[in-house]
Image (cartoon, grey):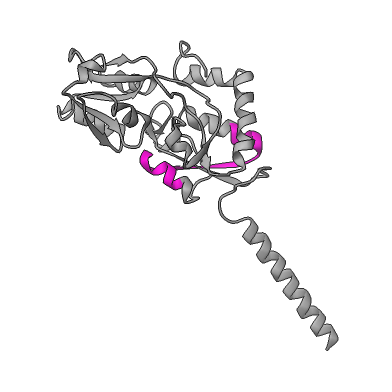
Amino acid sequence: MKRLKFLFTAFLTALLTITLVTACNSGTSTSGGGAGRTLTMATSADYPPYEFIDTSSGSQEIVGFDVDIAKFITEKLGYELKIDNVDFNALIPTLQSKRADFVMAGMTPTEERKQNVDFSQIYYEAKNAIVAKTGAGLATVASLNGKTLGVQLGSIQEQAAKDFQGANVKALNRINEMIQELKAGRIDAILMEDTVAKGYIASNPDLEINVLPNEGEAGSAVAFPKGSELLGEFDPIISELKSSGELEKLINKWFGSDTPAA
């Protein structure tokens, strides 16, 4: 009888141990020391060359500049990487609800966003640009007075456009929607990042790009849920990415050799 009692106690102890281990390994990871655990990155894969869906290979894989950086960082830290594609304006709510461990989406760390999420150091800087039909004469902020200007919902460009006096701002979820609206004549111009604009112009020769000088906040950073320990893990690797020359290689790969690093 004592032996049966002993075996039953041992069984319960083993079962409890298995349950605890399983519980500890479930969900998204929020601490360091990767050891093969999976981190979920949320992005908006309509923003080439930062992140976009590769249709050329038939794989529908999300690729791009941010994806390569995320892979570099997570591999260095020993994590596996999973990428979720969501609308840009849903990225911060996705972090706040802990459905992702971090966001990389060419996101600028504005003061408003810093109230809701934490940011890494800047890893890349770019400028805003006006995209319009060739010959439209929309090359400056002043020229947008009385015009309908498309911006991506939740983007830094949406915030910047609020200061464009006389412009009628129309926010849409995805950039390809704005391109279609522009070509159909339902908007007059689009405000977007210059490196992204170059990619769309390459496949739309009837459109032109005019780069604006930087004013205020600029640059891309990794976003995390408030208080995430991953911030302290990612920042040293981003510094290593810059100092080792690896970032410059990725910039040359995705943007061309005439684009400076942050």
Residue drawn where x is 59% and y is 31% of the image: 72
Q: Report if residue 141 is visible in the image.
A: yes
Residue drawn where x is 52% and y is 26% of the image: 122
Tell me the quarter of the picture where residue 107 sits. top left
Residue drawn where x is 80% and y is 84% of the image: 4
Among all residues in the image, which is located at the extreme right? 2
Q: Position of residue 199 (x, y in %)?
A: 35, 22
Magenta region: 73-94
Tell me the quarter of the picture where residue 189 sits. top left
Q: Is 23 on the left or on the right of 91, as rendered?
A: right
Q: Which quadrant is home to the N terminus?
A: bottom right
Residue 230 sits above or below residue 133 on the image = below
Tell me how many marks there are: 0
Residue 101 sits above or below residue 201 on the image = below
Q: Is 150 on the left or on the right of 73, as rendered?
A: left
In front of the other: 93 or 257: 93
In front of the other: 249 or 113: 113
Q: Is 242 on the left or on the right of 45, as rendered?
A: right
Q: Is 72 on the left or on the right of 168, as rendered?
A: right
Q: Position of residue 160 (x, y in %)?
A: 33, 27
Q: Report if residue 87 is visible in the image.
A: no
Tell me the quarter of the picture where residue 170 sits. top left
Q: Position of residue 178 (x, y in %)?
A: 25, 31
Among all residues in the image, which is located at the extreme top? 258
Confirm whether the magenta stretch covers residue 97: no
Q: Position of residue 207 (x, y in %)?
A: 23, 18
